[in-house]
Amino acid sequence: MQKIAERPLSSRTRAWLFGLLLAAVTVFMYQPAWNGGFIWDDDAYVTNNELLTAPDGLRRIWFSLDSPSQYFPLVYSTFRIEHALWGLNPTGYHWVNLLLHVANALLVWRLLARLRVPGAWLAGAIFALHPVQVESVAWITERKNVLMAFFFLLTLLAWIAFVDEWTKRPWRFYALALVLYVLALSAKTTACTLPAALLLILWLQKKPISWQRILQVIPFFFLGLGMGLVTVWWERYHQGTSRTLFAFLSPIERFLIASRAVWFYLSKLIWPSNLTFIYPKWNISPAHPLDYVWLLAGIALCAVIYFARRYVGRSVEVAAAFFVATLSPVLGFIMLYTFRYTFVADHYQYLASIGPIALASAGVATLACTFKRSRPLILSAAGCVTVTLALLTWRQAAMYADIEALWRTTLKGNPECWMAHNNLGIALFQKGDTDDAIAHYRTTLEMQPDFWDAEYNLGIALLSKGQVDEAIAHCSNAVRIAPNDPDAQVALGNALLQKGRIDDAIVYYQKALSIRPEYFLAHHSLGHAFLEKGEIDAAISHCRAALLIQPENADAHTNLAIALDEKGQTAEAIQHYQKALEISPQSISALTNLAWLLATCSNASFRNGTKALELAREADQLSGGTNTFVLHALAAAYAESGQFGKAIEIARAAMQLAQTQGDNSLAGALQQEIALYELALPYRETPK
């Protein structure tokens, strides 16, 4: 019987199988971060970013200076779309980052294969699974990194097609490359280094860099230069890098920082140990001879690469040039806000790492081809290294599963990191550990006395504990240090409002609005302040303005409902209470206020004792039976339902609790209402 020989898999089939395997392994190795939460400045980018919910948010993302960080319009646009799809569920944002990273790894493989770089498959795998990439993937804010890299790599592929003499109608690819480059710059401005990569591709392919080619690169250069200048301006005047803190770095110090940073990044690629979220900030001084070692070593390496090119070709110098050029915007020549606490970060080399990774992978593949007998051993060793990197990625991704664990891990590796102390304080405060949070804020201020964030956070924490005077002092310090920060203005306003200084509070809320006109918290707080002051029309105006910015905010609906009820617009007030409960069914304030209105309204057409009792009971259950205002509404609801014995019982318990708490005004009101209940009469509000 004739046997049918097995046909080997085609190269296309092998490529598809490898691509699917790489994607699956990468996704699996990031499993600890799949359901991670929001961390650090994810609040500015996502959770508290009004641009994601405001009706005119998309216009402002692209055509205003309202973004909370640099000009990243494409990033904020993706976040806005995702916010509409899955709200504030962080899992969706994490998965988009992860899928972009997988796509980038496949693009790295494809790009290097088009350039005929040996070991392109290995480079794609190492890029996907190297632990230095975790920060860019597991940190939602770093969407800008993975998104920029995606369009950066696509731009390079389009450029390769354009310069390929076999390409039909190449100018289509040139136009495509320009469009893709604009998208890359719209994601992150560090894409401005792409013109250098275009020239390096020509150099690697031994194509002449003629004046014609230079003219073709010039549009990319000017696009990158324009966006780069915007970023420099933004960092200097919007992010604060013009402050005295940054002015102390001389040109020599910047060169010393840059030279050391290059070696730092290379070392983390070669030996990725002790990776941390914030690295210790170096002390650099031109007076210390040892600080010049990194610069001299860099010069020596450049000389070695230059003289070795006749033996190893252009690959080494291209890889080195790509690495340094792509890192150049973050090496220290341009001041970044993050330089306040560190000069380096893993996510800075997300794209730059392609150079050394491609070089190392090409070296492995070349060795395997040269020494064919040792090929299995060489490839097995490469496989073991890749598996080790994957396991390190798994461990590193676990840091991002929990915000508190992230900052505690950071402090283990960098105990003098005042920023980590501050951010751990924030995590603890949100968790309810206010005393521990305050301790970390105070530690931050001991290390960094003029850090307004710590003053601001400490003020808020103290205010939550009722230490109003000290809260006012720290919030005042925050306003003094950062007079143009609207958050600090609102925090001080809140402290003053709690002190009873309503007019002073209103002044600071209005200052916040003058800095950021479409600021939800300022409008929301002003609505509350004017409500307490009795200026109902102003309160309604600001509550409506707040809802235009955040239409799904339950507290804003509740505040507007209170103001409308005071104005006598009962029907609309009920609608907003109901909307608040639709958004937040367990809102005690909305449940209580609506129950009170339905039980005591002077207009019989709005009263509904059964519904009022249902709402008040739910509020009482949620509050644990110890909230005097809830008990007050519950008693009124029982009375409206005709259960006067129960109304008297609840009202007396509420009155006793109010007296214990020193709330004599509420205790007096309850005493008068009990007298009505004893006469079998429900309480009625005075008509507005």
Image (cartoon, helix red, strand yellow):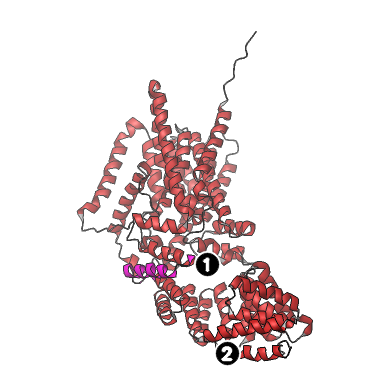
- Which is more toward the observer, 675 or 91? 675
Q: Amino acid at mark 1?
A: Leu
Q: Relative to residue 217, is residue 629 depicted above or below?
A: below
Q: Point out the frontmost of discs 2 and 1.
A: 2
The region drawn magenta spans 431-451
Asked whether the viewer can see residue 193, the reply is: no
Looking at the image, residue 491 lies above or below residue 311: below
The answer to whether 543 is drawn above or below residue 257 in the figure is below
Q: Nearer the viewer, residue 422 or 185?
A: 422
Q: Which residue is mark 2?
A: 665
- The amino acid type of the residue labelled 2 equals Ser
Task: State which quarter of the image contains the C terminus.
Answer: bottom right
Within 10 Å of disc 1 (Cα), the crowding (few <14, some 14-19, many 20+) is: few
Q: Which residue is mark 1?
A: 65
Q: Secondary structure at mark 1?
A: loop
Secondary element at image label 2:
helix
Please provide percent x and percent y for residue 515: 51, 75
At 68% from the left and 82% from the top, the residue drawn is 647
Residue appearing at x 35%, y 72% in the figure = 450
Q: Quadrant of residue 684?
A: bottom right
User: Going 43% across and 48% down the picture, which residue do you hit?
Assistant: 396
Direction from residue 513 to residue 404 in the image, left or right: left
Rendered location of residue 286, percent (x, y) = 23, 58
Closest to the observer: 76 or 458?
458
